[in-house]
Amino acid sequence: MSMNEIIKASGLVYKYDTEEEVAALDNVNLSINKGEFVVIIGHNGSGKSTLAKHLNALLRPTGGTVIIKGMDTRDPNLTWEIRQTAGMVFQNPDNQLVATVVEEDVAFGPENLGMPPEVIRERVDEALRIVNMSEYSSFAPHLLSGGQKQRVAIAGIIAMRPECIILDEPTAMLDPVGRKEVMDTIKKLNKTERITIIHITHFMEEAVDADRVYVMESGKVVLQGKPKEVFKQVERIKQLGLDVPQITELAYRLNKEGFDIPPDILTVEEMVDVLCP
């Protein structure tokens, strides 16, 4: 691994049943640097959630390796340390919340790490502040919206101070308001707190601000690059059964109608700049 790499998968293969012909992950190679915001996209069954579970040792490779900050996930003695380095947030916030009060839920991880009470207090307060949930610290989680619950789940991971957070479709069960809340939080974690983010999603718009995008299909990485490089390949993305961001789709259609518009437009602002120079 290079000095800047925090996660490296090499020739990663995974079969849920060793007798299966088809691998859920088939020779996956990826490299993620400290401080990056990486998005992994693909439709259901593409292998992206299976990959996510390898990035904090919830699953171990059938073949190949996954190295997290120099630690091989195949070594069971390193599992605890790996999970402190790479925290995981799942799709359904209700499955992640364990306490009857928000601040107790956020304290759960640091308590299990055996931290002194004053450090736990400090970490809980800081984590709730980062996700803009401080005013809800004494609320019962079941009184919160879906987006708020997911932000509490993220705060619970932040309180353990991981260097990297893996989010496995954290917005899939949320309405548009909740999705925006969670995406704003994810971007803040990356840009302000400098936490490495690996965000797994099937919402293309959520990949627009990433540093890099990996596209998965049938357990393989089939496309990778900066969002502009990936999404301008509209035909290829559609062949994979995926959509492109709506503005990229608009640029693609306008081009087909004879308008001279760059194919790699991702945002409304970029489109306005082109149409109204």
Image: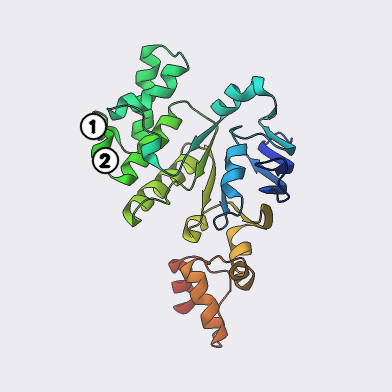
| Residue at x 41% of width, y 30% of height | 156
Direction from residue 44 to residue 99 in the image, left or right: left
**How many C-alpha atoms fall within 10 Å of the one at disc 1: few (<14), some, or many (≥20)?**
few
Q: Which residue is mark 2?
A: 144
Direction from residue 10 to residue 233 in the image, left or right: left
Q: Which residue is mark 1?
A: 139
Near-viewer residue (220 or 159): 220
Near-viewer residue (218 or 161): 218
From the image, which quarter does the N terminus lie in?
top right
Does the image show residue 74?
yes
Task: Find residue 175 and report its image quarter.
Answer: bottom left
| Residue at x 49% of width, y 27% of height | 161
Can you give x and y, in whole percent of width and height, for residue 21 in the image?
A: 73, 50
Badge 2 marks a residue whose secondary structure is loop
Can you give x and y, in whole percent of width and height, for residue 147 in the image?
A: 34, 46
Is 268 placed above or below 39 here?
below
Q: Which residue is the extreme one toward the front? A: 19
| Residue at x 54% of width, y 52% of height | 210
| Residue at x 43% of width, y 68% of height | 268
**How many C-alpha atoms fall within 10 Å of the one at disc 2: few (<14), some, or many (≥20)?**
some
Q: Mark 2 or mark 1: which comes first in sequence?
A: 1
Near-viewer residue (191 or 87): 87
Q: Which residue is the extreme one toward the top? A: 116
Please, what is the three-letter code of the amino acid marked with disc 2?
A: Leu
Does the image show residue 34?
no
Please, what is the three-letter code of the amino acid marked with disc 1?
A: Phe
Q: Which residue is the extreme one toward the bottom? A: 258
Can you give x and y, in whole percent of width and height, for residue 154 in the image?
A: 42, 36
Direction from residue 221 to residue 167 in the image, left or right: left
Badge 1 marks a residue whose secondary structure is loop
Can you give x and y, in whole percent of width and height, for residue 117 in the image?
A: 36, 13
